[in-house]
């Protein structure tokens, strides 16, 4: 579960960096399911985690987002 949370966090930060510091739930969910389609059957449970991580990311400054992304980007490369 923790690995999934880190992956979601990385995707949310990547999305936020691309879109002026604000991550989009739809974009993060879509990217997650494209990477891990097997999670589709658990999407209701996972959406709660996605929403939590998006709130966390959107509360960070752009600089903080970039610093965190540097540490997590290997999860999505």
Image (spheres, rainbow, N blue to C red):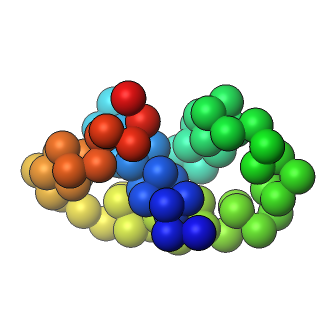
- Residue at horizontal 59 percent and vertical 49 percent from the top: 25
Image point (36%, 60%), residue name: 57
Tell me residue 62's x, y (percent): 18, 49
Q: Position of residue 6 (x, y in %)?
A: 43, 59
Q: In which quarter of the image is the C terminus?
A: top left
Decide: is 34 above or below 4.
above
Q: Residue at x 82, y 59 (%)?
A: 42
Relative to 60, residue 16 above or below = above
Q: Quadrant of residue 27?
A: top right
Q: Is residue 33 above or below residue 51?
A: above
* Horizontal side, residue 72 vs residue 23: left or right: left
The quarter in which the N terminus is drawn is bottom right
Above/below status of 34 relative to 53: above
Residue 37 in sight from this viewpoint: yes
Tell me the quarter of the picture where residue 31 sits. Answer: top right
Q: In the figure, is residue 1 to the left or right of 36? A: left
Q: Which of 13 and 58 is in front in this view?
A: 13
């Amino acid at each position: 579960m923790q690995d999934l949370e880190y992956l979601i966090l990385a995707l949310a930060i990547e999305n936020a960096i691309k879109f002026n510091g604000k991550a989009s739930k739809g974009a993060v969910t879509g990217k997650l399911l494209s990477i891990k389609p097997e999670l589709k059957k658990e999407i209701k449970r996972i959406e709660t985690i996605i929403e939590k991580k998006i709130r966390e990311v959107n509360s960070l400054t752009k600089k903080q987002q970039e610093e965190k992304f540097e540490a997590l980007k290997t999860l999505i490369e």
